[in-house]
């Protein structure tokens, strides 16, 4: 009873890996771990058997070469006639695999409980228990969910659906459910889980509870959505083609087809070699290329391919094996960028590098930032001599605060790690002169890929930087002064400034996501012209002009605007930006101008007609004034002749007066002689009677002549006086006629001037009518 092996059957020997000769006479301890043999438990084990006690259980034993064996065994003591234990018979079954499976299952359950959210439900869906991970995931405490129904974690609409009822019906029938589920934690927190609902069966095979194992895949779900978006973006930006593992084309996107010049039906099911040089396709290197991909290895690099028309195409590509759930490659997807032009340019790079040295500022640093060399362009740009730079640190070109910063230290750490840097940099030249440079810092690697030095190529962009600042200021000024709105290519608002909100009367929240048609009348939106408007914008055509739009509450808004397609670096239109300013008041004013212009045109036409009548009257007045002047001049001439005749009459009257005076003197002498004759006749007596009679008659005749002479003299004096008065009055009349002639001349000139002015006024009024007409037409055209 010391554990010595007396006998063993073949099954035991096979299980433990020994032959009988190797175990006969050996101790039982041969099959146990040394630590176990030395333990009190092992000693107690044999003491119990020595007392004749039966032992049954699972035991860990060690087979040949230290192999671990688990057995289900019973140790049965055999006693002699006196009841003394003389030997022990052991019956054993190999449960190593079962034990391992159980241990593995227990370990897995423990691991699952540590790694996954676990929750148990009864068949009615009520929570029985949940582990801490589930509680942390949902944000609940155990006391808040135990006894609650599963619907606590679900969307209310889903809970009311037939699908939810069928879900629990299948679980109660013993069916397993798994998948991705959207659930809700405490306070409505949205959670995506990858979960399995597993019915647990009793000994009769009937389900009695449900255990759910879940993992939080919210981040994964979001990342998957992001990845899907990225793949879509890649499809839009790169050439993509898929192959089976033999190299046959499964599909190709439009960019790939365009790059190689094929249609889809020309490449699908064709072998990849159709894109290769025929000689290369027959080489071992090409066979190894596909063997490598078949093993699931990625291949990337620059490849020479042949297009449909035999043209050479260079691509930067990655060939990426796609694996199934078992990790076996099932197909190959290739992402490629056409670098044909770049490749062609590479042939010129060596010469260009030299040209760069002649045209750009170039400086070299060691990996600590100390200057090794600088070309003349760099020296001229910074204002130094080479002797002033070599051996100095790069920080001499930097602002002191920046040179002391962690950012600057990280800059050189990245260069030391072989990372490329490029961008615009603020630097200081000699005497603190400020510069902006567009530069690249290029680590130069040795044959082992270790950075040895840094070469910097730089251009002075100080002037362009200032211009860019000015440009940004202008753009900012436009944003401050004009209404600006951005649309996607379908016409939906993606951005607005405050001016646009103010013009249209909407808030930013009301506008984002709305279609451009919101601002247009229903009639316009239904027209072909409106559809053509957006088609042209999507073609890259700018639209400018005056537009009628509808603001909030149906308010009419008139804008002067330009719709400008915005392109990315590839020349593809990505959005539409509209610059506009409000001309509603101007349009109203133009309408008023058109109305007033029409009224003014009518008034000016009437004025023109009146001026034409005045012109006609002035012409007639001119004719009459000319005739009047002529008549006045003739009257003046006639009056002058009359005055001359009167002056002759005056002279004749004076002569007659003199003659009458002579007659009067003769009559007086005759009367005197007659008187003397009467005296002589009286003296003669009777002889003088006849003579006396004659003398008396003569005297009477003389008296009558004298009387007549006196009357004639009186009349002549009156005539002379009146002729004098007539002469004076005629002279006054002549003076008046002179003034009349002068006035008539002035009147005639004034009438001529009036006629000229009315003619000029008629011309001006015609011009005014034309200008008003043009203004009316211009405002109509502007409104259109």
Image (cartoon, rainbow, N blue to C red):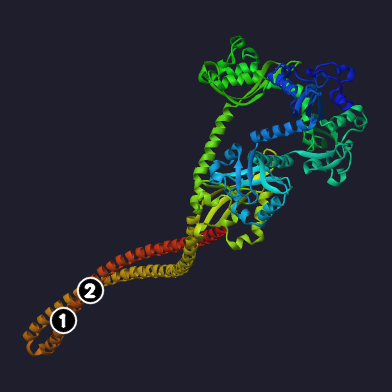
Residue 185, image x, y percentages: 57, 44
Q: Residue at x 70, y 50 (%)?
A: 171
Front residue of this view, candidates 77 and 608: 77
**Looking at the figure, which quarter contains the C terminus?**
bottom right
Q: Would you call the spot at circle 1 few (<14 residues within 10 Å), some (14-19), or many (20 or more)?
A: some
Residue 722, which numbered label?
A: 2
Determine the CA span between mark 2 and mark 1.
22 Å
Residue 278, which numbered label?
A: none
Front residue of this view, candidates 223 and 685: 223
Element carrying mark 2:
helix
* 9 lies above or below 260: above
477 lies left or right of 641: right
Residue 707, which numbered label?
A: 1
* 741 lies above or below 545: below
Residue 173, image x, y percentages: 72, 52
**Looking at the figure, which quarter contains the N terminus?**
top right
Q: Would you call the spot at circle 2 few (<14 residues within 10 Å), some (14-19), or many (20 or more)?
A: few
């Amino acid at each position: 009873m010391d554990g010595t092996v007396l006998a063993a059957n073949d099954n035991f020997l096979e299980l433990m890996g020994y032959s009988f000769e190797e175990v006969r006479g050996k101790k039982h301890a041969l099959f146990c771990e040394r630590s176990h043999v030395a333990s009190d438990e092992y000693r107690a084990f044999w003491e119990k058997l020595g007392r004749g006690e039966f032992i049954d259980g699972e035991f860990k034993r060690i087979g040949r070469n230290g192999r671990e064996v688990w057995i289900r065994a019973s140790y049965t003591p055999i006693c002699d006639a006196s009841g003394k234990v003389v030997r022990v018979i052991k019956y054993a079954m190999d449960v190593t695999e079962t034990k391992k499976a159980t241990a593995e299952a227990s370990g897995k359950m423990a691991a699952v409980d540590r790694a996954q959210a676990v929750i148990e439900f009864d068949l009615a869906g009520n929570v029985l228990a949940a582990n801490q991970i589930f509680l942390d995931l949902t944000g609940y405490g155990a006391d808040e969910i135990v006894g609650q129904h599963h619907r606590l974690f679900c969307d209310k609409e889903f809970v009311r659906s037939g699908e939810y009822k069928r879900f629990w019906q299948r679980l109660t029938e013993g069916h397993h459910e798994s998948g991705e589920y959207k659930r809700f934690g405490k306070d409505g927190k949205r959670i995506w889980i990858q979960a399995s609902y597993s019915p647990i069966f009793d000994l009769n095979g009937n389900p009695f509870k449900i255990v759910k194992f879940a993992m939080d895949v919210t981040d994964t779900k979001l990342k998957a959505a992001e990845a899907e978006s990225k793949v879509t973006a890649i499809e839009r930006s790169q050439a993509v083609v898929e192959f089976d593992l033999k190299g046959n084309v499964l599909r190709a996107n439009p960019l790939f087809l365009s790059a190689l010049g094929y249609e889809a039906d020309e490449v699908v099911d064709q072998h990849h070699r159709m894109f290769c040089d025929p000689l290369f396709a027959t080489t071992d290197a090409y066979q190894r290329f596909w063997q490598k991909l078949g093993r699931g290895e990625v291949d990337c690099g620059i490849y020479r391919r042949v297009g449909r028309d035999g043209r050479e195409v260079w691509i930067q590509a990655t060939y990426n094996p796609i694996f199934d759930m078992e990790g076996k490659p099932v197909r190959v997807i290739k992402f490629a960028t056409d670098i044909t032009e770049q490749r062609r340019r590479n042939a010129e790079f060596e010469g260009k590098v030299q040209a760069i040295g002649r045209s750009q500022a170039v400086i070299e640093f060691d990996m600590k930032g100390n200057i090794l060399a600088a070309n003349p362009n760099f020296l001229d740009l910074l204002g130094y001599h080479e002797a002033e730079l070599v051996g100095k640190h790069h920080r001499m070109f930097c602002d002191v605060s920046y040179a002391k910063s962690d950012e600057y230290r990280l800059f050189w750490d990245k260069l030391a790690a072989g990372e490329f840097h490029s961008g615009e940099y603020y630097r200081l030249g000699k005497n603190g002169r400020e510069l902006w440079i567009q530069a690249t810092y290029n680590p130069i690697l040795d044959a082992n890929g270790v950075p040895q030095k840094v070469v910097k190529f730089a251009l002075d962009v100080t002037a362009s930087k200032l211009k860019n600042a000015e440009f940004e200021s202008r753009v900012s000024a436009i944003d401050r002064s004009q209404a600006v709105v951005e649309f996607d290519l379908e016409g939906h608002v993606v951005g607005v400034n405050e001016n646009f909100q103010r013009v249209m009367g909407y808030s930013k929240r009301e506008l984002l996501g709305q279609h451009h048609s919101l601002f247009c009348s229903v009639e316009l939106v239904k027209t072909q012209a409106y559809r053509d408007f957006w088609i042209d914008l999507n073609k890259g055509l700018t639209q400018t002009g005056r537009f009628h739009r509808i603001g909030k509450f149906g308010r009419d808004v008139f804008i002067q605007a330009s719709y400008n397609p915005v392109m990315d670096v590839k020349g593809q239109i990505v959005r539409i930006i509209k610059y506009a300013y409000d001309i509603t008041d101007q349009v109203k004013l133009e309408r008023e101008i058109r109305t007033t212009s029409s009224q003014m045109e009518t008034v000016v036409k009437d004025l023109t007609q009146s001026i034409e009548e005045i012109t006609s009257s002035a012409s007639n007045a001119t004719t009459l004034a000319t005739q009047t002047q002529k008549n006045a001049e003739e009257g003046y001439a006639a009056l002058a002749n009359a005055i001359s005749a009167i002056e002759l009459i005056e002279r004749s009257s004076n002569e007659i007066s003199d003659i009458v005076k002579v007659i009067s003197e003769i009559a007086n002498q005759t009367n005197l002689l007659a008187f003397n004759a009467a005296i002589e006749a009286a003296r003669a007596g009777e002889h003088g009677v006849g003579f006396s009679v004659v003398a008396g008659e003569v005297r009477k005749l003389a008296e009558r002549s004298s009387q007549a002479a006196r009357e004639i003299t009186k009349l002549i004096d009156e005539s002379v006086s009146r002729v004098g008065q007539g002469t004076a009055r005629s002279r006054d009349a002549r003076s008046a006629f002179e003034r009349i002639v002068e006035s008539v001349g002035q009147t005639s000139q004034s009438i001529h001037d009036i006629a000229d002015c009315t003619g000029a006024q008629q011309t001006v009024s015609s011009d005014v009518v034309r200008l008003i007409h043009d203004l009316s037409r211009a405002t109509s055209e502007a409104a259109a």
